[in-house]
Image: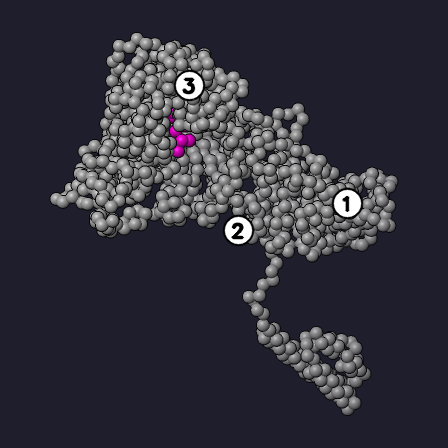
Amino acid sequence: MKISLSWISKYTKIPNTIKEKYDLADKFARQIADIDGITHYGEHTKDIIVGKIIRIQNHGNADKLKITQIDIGEKEYLQIVTGAPNIYEGMYVPVAKIGITLPGGLTIEKRDLRGVPSYGMLCSEKELMISDNHEGIMDLGDIKDIKAGENLISYIEDLIFDIDNKVISNRGDLFSHEGIAREIATLQRTEYIKNKIQDIKSNENKKINIDINAKNFCFRYTAIIVKNVKIKESPMYIRRNLEKLGIQSINNIVDITNYIMLDTGQPLHAFDLDKIGGEDTEIIVRKAKNEERIKTLDQKERVLSEENYLIATKSAPIAIAGIMGGYDSKVDENTKNILIESATFSPKLIRKSSKSINLRTDASLRYEKRVDPNKTMRALLETVNLIQKEGIGEIASQVIDITNIQDIGKKEILSFDFNRIEKVIGIKIEKRTVQDILERLNFEVKISKDNIISVKVPTERDDIKEDVDLIEDIGRIYGYDKIPLKNPIYEIKPGREDIVYKTKQAIKTIISACGGYEIKTYSFINEDLLKKSMLDDVSKIKIINPNSEDYTILRSSLIPSILKTVSINQKNSDSFIFYEIANVYKENRGEELPKEEYELIISAYNKKLETFFSLKNIIEAIKEYLPLKGDIIYQNFLKIPYLKNKSSKIYLNDEYIGDIGNIHPEIRENFNINGNLTISVIQIKNIIKYIDPFQKIKPISKYPEIKIDLNITIDNSISAKSIIDIIYDENLRSKNIVDVYKGKPLKDNQTGLTIRLVFENFEETFKIEDIHKKIEKIKEYVTKKFSNVLFR
Amino acid sequence: MQNLTDEILKATKEALDDIKNCDNIQSLRKVSSEYKGKESNLYKILTKISQLQGEEKKLIGSRINESKAKIDNALSQKEQELKISEYEKEESEYLDITLIKEVRTLGSTHPVTQMIQKIVDIFGLYGFSHVTDREIETDWFCFQALNMDIDHPAREMQDTFYIEENHILPRTHTSSVQIRTMLKSKPPIRIISAGRVYRNENQDARHSFMFYQYEGLIIDNNITIADLKSILTQALRKIFENDKIELRLRHSYFPYTEPSFEVDATCMLCEGKGCKVCDFKGWLELLGAGMVHPQVLRNVGINPKEYQGFAFGGGPERLIMIKNEINDTRLFYENDLRFLSQLKKL
């Protein structure tokens, strides 16, 4: 929302110099609301002076040209020849004298126009980069106390703040110049002067029939009829003020309603009374019907639903309430009588209505943020005051004011312990300072002897609900810069350890140390990527409102994303290892929320060399680094997307923890991957429980240790681990599977294992016969327990 | 006897010649063991001594000893020579130490991971522990509990992705972790949480539909805005390793904090003088913060009269971008090895 600083000066003193104005903007952005941008209005008019047209003569040799004599505060008038259509004697205009360079780059020279010398140029707003208006010379007639010969900039210079609406989204009262002015006055500690409103003196008894049918939507409806309106261009100051803030000037009546809206924050609307059934018409505020249609002011045909609300007569809708007026009831050059509406609508319902037809306007913006229902009457009176002042219409009815709010105008009182302020902010602020800040912000304040502060809240401040809301106002105006740094004092206790985070970090560390690069890919993928990865049959949780066709599904596998990443990077590198730890999402029957589990994916790519074992080594490294208790076993082949004969499931202590395998060539082709690619996926949840935080270290014997490899063949009914488990000897230091073999000469259901036993003796050097005895004992025991185990 | 003397001389000469002919340590060692072993000619002569008598025995014995000493001497001299010549050989060899093989042996964690780790470590010093929690949330945890009721604009479809309309959604901020934590544990609470968040935004240099957030929360008896300012100042000074950084709290609005702030830090690149990175303001907007709204505390069953605290949150990407003067957020999720391989940290 845009605010003009010179408009603010109607309410309170604003700084004179441009530097001070920018300083104010800086404070404003920190203590009131962030500013998205500042426009320095008129900044290009430093060299332009004010001139007054004294005389206009026709040019003898050209129909369109006029010869003007301009008073520029000097003894002699300046003669300027111009082709502008809008000049008149007595008009104040911007003058660029000879030698001046206009912002567009044109330097003014003495010229002869068809035999008549011209000593300068009269400028349009566009030529001065004030607006896009190039229709005529800029008319300075609205400027008070203007004097010929003075610098133009001193009269028109302004700063326009474009305020970040988000920061004031709970402050409906700040969507107005009067609201912002009060904040600025508080900040500067300058006096705030309220608008003076004159009561309407009228003997008209005419009433307007108003029926608020949608009571939950329309809180208050205030209206008046004005007759004999003279539609024309609005006064210059109104036009300029609207245009400065980006609102197009339409005609005097429409402009005045907009002007009062920008000033007070109360949206107003004028209907052409004769187009809505004349003075005996009935105005109905009601819900729209499904498929009901209305052509709005922007000439668009709108199809409505029950989410919209209408201002209507008995026969037709005349406006989408609070959003935009109807085209067929608009005020135009032929309008004679008008009805002016000043109403309050429900913020929530306006937001819904506006969203459902995707139409946001200056009015709906304000209604969404809440307009104080107490404002309708005051804003309507201001509008009528202005119409009367300009002499463009006469009151033709009573002011009709209907509301269904019981306690309108009632002010809430908030009381709390004064010490709360210090308890929240952290420093002591004096009572009189607190009182001053709040009173300037229009609160009524009492602080009792027993330190209770009671605050009467003005009706436009419905954001004030509890003590902290007021403490915020006190804090920001007092200035957070004045709060010194102070370390908190609290009892420190070690918090609970986040094992998931810690494990993730440890895995990242070890894989990186093994040469892996961590990637971060998007959690959303699409069908196409799944198809290319030959993973069509996985869980697919869909996003109902995706914003790109590339990202429509919550991924249940990390494989597609890493394939895409490998594909992109193989162009620049011949070999690399990538990994990612991220959630995958799966449907969770009977539960409200989907299943969400962390997975680790690792990929090893090499243009020429086999990659399987470098990845397998990384898995072993993870096991040792975390460390994981027990043994990792690779068995059982996998299917697509892996190659059957070059893949395996991974088990830790007989529990499935993941997969490893080379990727099927068809998938590599789908992703244009040329070279070897192995991928492994590990379930973080399944390994966390095997992390051994108390891993012990043992002394080593000074006598030589003995390594014995046992080659055994088992069938698939026995797990390798169950054999490892029963191997025991008092001198056994370690027992590990060092090789697994499948294939000829073994049968299909057989696996060959090599188990390495390491014996150690702390007393003496082993005698070879003793070791043989131990081995025989172990073999005997294993064969006794498992009849189908063969030692080779 | 003359025979024996001649044999000794011959054997000695042979030995000395062999030694002389050695051109490396290994052959010298071989020669050495040959002449010291039982198979050597000298040893054989020695065995004959027992057959001799008196003076003769004495004489031959001392000849043998002399010759042994000669050989030993020659051996050690030769050994010395050979060693020196080997050292010299290696010394004379040239290795171009600027040559490197192009083998990447060390990988790295993602820059975002590194920044999060840094933040978690720093807040760890203040007793904040990391908490991991869900990404797909219900509207209650992501919005309602945080004082954003059903009509709050942030909940609209143009800002939030939905799995089920107005109900199940990928979280739009990590603040949902605050709620889950406060429901589970009693004050005092000091947590930091980092993770993925999702917003329905179109991708460009400044926006991504997925990004990371870190979030901190402290709830205790006497936590004030002054504490907030102090902890955040020290943390940001550590993150940017710059003790000159000052913070500025700028009034803002978030439904879940009151008062609310945008936290600006002195631009560390120009030290507040104004530069391109800070848009010539001298200040950088780094995070959002505020005192936890009493309604949020009530929503999770904490009495706001007894406890209060502050929360803060921001984007690790933004901190990295400022530190490295990067201006395209897409770099973080394109996963180009040439980008990722720059910061070698584990």
The three-letter code of the residue at mark 2 reads Leu
The subunit letter for the residue under badge 3 reads A
Q: Residue furthest top?
A: A205
Foreground mark, 3 or 2, reads: 3
Q: Secondary structure at mark 1?
A: strand
- How far is the residue under mark 2 from the one under mark 1? 37 Å
Which label is found at residue A619?
none
Residue of label 2: B343
Q: Which one is in front, A560 or A576?
A: A560
B325 relative position to A111: left or right: right
The three-letter code of the residue at mark 1 reads Lys
Q: Residue at x 68, y 79 (%)?
A: B23
Residue of label 1: A644
- How far is the residue under mark 3 from the one under mark 1? 68 Å
The subunit letter for the residue under badge 2 reads B
Quarter of the image where one finds residue B287: top left
Residue of label 3: A345
Query: Mark 2 near mark 1, Cβ–Cβ under 8 Å?
Result: no
